[in-house]
Amino acid sequence: MADDTAGGTGPTGAGTGGDSVAVSDNSGASRFEITVGGVTAGFAVYRLRAGKIIFTHTEILPEFEGRGLGGRLASAALDASRASGRAVVPLCPFFAGYIRRHPAYRDLVPESYADLLDEET
């Protein structure tokens, strides 16, 4: 399990009460998981297809909301996707919005899926 250091906050970033925060790929369950102090706080479900990772659902458990964990989870999952050379298909509205707000990840989304990044009306 790797510590998530997205955003330069390190594993004990603000809003976590000093508990360590880590993101890992639970490939057996097809999801990235974020833990706080060893407790699962949320996850991002994905499907793998040839050369692609399709993010379908993201959830942060209610007792962990409001701590920025969703963003840390998305960032770590997108960084892992980049490192693996996979294109990203953000079917999950949370991932689409995160990529829209963080254009450094825009290049991971193939043009044929660019409409998923359009603002919701």
Image (tube, grey):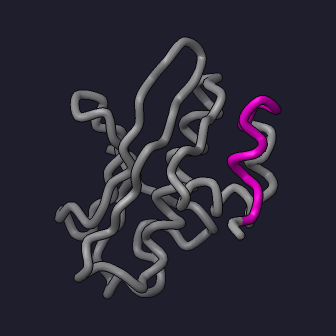
Front-most of residues 22 and 50: 50
> Residue 22, how many percent across, how many down?
36, 58
Name of the residue lying farthest toward the left: 39
Magenta-colored span: 109-119
Which corner quadrant holds the N terminus? top left
| SS assignment for the magenta stretch, majority | helix
Asked if 118 appears above or below 78 in the picture, the reply is below
**Quarter of the figure with residue 86:** top right
> Residue 102, how many percent across, how many down?
74, 61
> Residue 77, how many percent across, how many down?
50, 45
Is 115 part of what is drawn in magenta? yes
Front-most of residues 14 and 89: 89
Residue 54 left/right relative to 104: left
Asked if 40 appears above or below 28 in the picture, the reply is below
Q: How many marks?
A: 0
Name of the residue lying farthest toward the front: 121
Front-most of residues 34 and 114: 114
The residue shown at (23%, 34%) is 29
> Residue 24, how many percent across, how many down?
35, 45
Name of the residue lying farthest toward the top: 50
Asked if 4 appears above or below 15 in the picture, the reply is above
The residue shown at (32%, 51%) is 33
Which corner quadrant holds the C terminus? bottom right
**Quarter of the figure with residue 31:** top left
**Quarter of the figure with residue 108:** top right
